[in-house]
Image: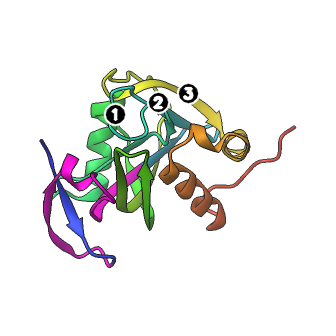
Amino acid sequence: MADLILVDSQDNEIGVMEKVKAHLGDGTLHRAFSAIVFNKNGETLIAQRSAGKMLWPLYWDNTCASHPFPGEDIVASGERRLSEELGFSCPLKKVDVFQYQAKYLDIGAENELCATLIGEYNGAVDPVESEVADYKWVNIADLKDDMINNPDKYTIWFKIAVDRLIEKGIIKLKEKL
């Protein structure tokens, strides 16, 4: 199993821990990322987590969410995981970092210092079944509306990342015609 990078609230590395162990109980604070990929039409690619995920199975998520390996740059990690989960990669840019903690039923929790990475891609998507149950391109305004009306369909970190990107003006909600 993979080791996660444990960090303090200032993103200083303080050790490593096996992935499942880091997600048990209330979770142990570790480094993570949420990659949000857009196309030339301003739509974002969202992925439904596979049924086999320990936490938040079958929830809709940002394009790709994961953890860097010890010693791996967070942006390089995001680009690597796009390829491993969705069959494509694109250049990503780190635009935000936030900390959150969320319990999932009585199974475990996320406790992450999460970097938000954004990029653009306009080609084919070839998801890996063990990672992604489904995917779709969606207009960000429609996505935000659905997050408000159906919040239990989406992962907590995805909702936080989208809200922060809107608040910071990094993504803009376009008016519907």
- x 23%, y 55%: residue: 22
- x 73%, y 51%: residue: 173
Mark 2 Cα shell of 10 Å, populated few (<14), some (14-19), many (≥20):
some
Residue range (magenta): 10-34
Work out how far the residue at label 2 is from the one at label 1, CA to CA, in angstroms: 8 Å
User: What residue does disc 3 label?
Assistant: 136
- Element type where label 3 sits in the image: strand
- Element type where label 1 sits in the image: loop
Q: Residue 94 occupies which quadrant of the picture?
A: bottom left
Q: Is residue 14 magenta?
A: yes
The amino acid type found where label 3 is placed reads: Lys
- Element type where label 2 sits in the image: loop
- x 69%, y 55%: residue: 172
- Residue 73 relative to residue 122: left or right: left
Q: Is residue 111 magenta?
A: no
Q: Nearer the viewer, residue 63 or 124?
A: 63
Position in image of residue 145 (x %, y %): 74, 44
Labelled disc at residue 58? 2
First-in-chain label (2 vs 3): 2
Work out how far the residue at label 2 is from the one at label 3, CA to CA, in angstroms: 14 Å
Position in image of residue 174 (x %, y %): 76, 48
Mark 1 Cα shell of 10 Å, populated few (<14), some (14-19), many (≥20):
few
First-in-chain label (2 vs 1): 1
Work out how far the residue at label 3 is from the one at label 1, CA to CA, in angstroms: 19 Å
Mark 3 Cα shell of 10 Å, populated few (<14), some (14-19), many (≥20):
few
User: What residue does disc 1 label?
Assistant: 53
Figure label count: 3
